[in-house]
Image (cartoon, helix red, strand yellow):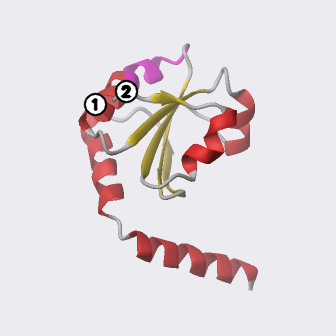
Amino acid sequence: MSAINLTEATFEETINSEGILLIDWWAEWCGPCKQFAPIFESAAEKHQDITFAKIDTEAEQNLAGAVGITSIPTLMAFRDGILLYAQPGALPAEALDQIIEQVQALDMDKVRAEVAAEETQAEG
């Protein structure tokens, strides 16, 4: 399954879905984005149980600005609506595989408890 294209209209619903979501923020003029694209597509073919999405920062400038994208390519990883990873830079295939493995291995009950504790601490 190849990567889906996300837009401002589909972003919120998609990131709040169950399961793992990887997003590649890119632009047509970006050399490193073009180098990373086949690595991302290959991972999408290999991991059918994960949603892979791409967001064109030129077409979605408002969304990129709202999310704070300042450098591309940027990779974001969500699981069950929780942002777990967000870093700019083109990754080699091995590094992308490691991120996927780490996200898959997480105990999401523990992660949700940590997020809730941080929110409680921020409110207090």
Residue under label 2: 2
Packing grade of label 1 (10 A; few <14, some 14-19, many >=20) is some
Q: Give left or right: position of 25 versus 57.
A: left
Name the quarter where the C terminus is drawn.
Answer: bottom right
Which is nearer the eye, 4 or 70?
4
Name the quarter where the N terminus is drawn.
Answer: top left
Q: Quadrant of residue 57?
A: top right
Mark 2–mark 1 distance (CA, rounded to whole Å): 6 Å
Residues in magenta, as a range: 29-37
Q: Secondary structure at mark 2?
A: loop
Image spot of residue 22 (x, y percent): 44, 42
Q: Residue at x 28, y 31 (%)?
A: 45
Image spot of residue 52 (x, y percent): 42, 37
Packing grade of label 2 (10 A; few <14, some 14-19, many >=20) is some
- The kind of secondary structure the magenta stretch mainly shows is helix
Which is nearer the eye, 27 or 43?
43
Q: Give left or right: position of 48 versus 36.
A: left
Q: Please check the rendered image and state whether residue 82 is part of the magenta-colored stretch, yes or no.
A: no
| Amino acid tagged 1 | Glu
Q: Give left or right: position of 28 versus 35.
A: right
Q: Residue at x 47, y 29 (%)?
A: 4
Q: Residue at x 50, y 73 (%)?
A: 112
Image spot of residue 116 (x, y percent): 59, 77
Cβ–Cβ below 8 Å for labels 2 and 1? yes
| Amino acid tagged 2 | Ser
Q: Which mark is residue 45?
A: 1
Q: Residue at x 57, y 32 (%)?
A: 6
Q: Secondary structure at mark 1?
A: helix
Residue 114 lies, with reference to residue 42, above or below; the image says below
Sequence-earlier tag: 2 or 1: 2
Image spot of residue 85 (x, y percent): 47, 52
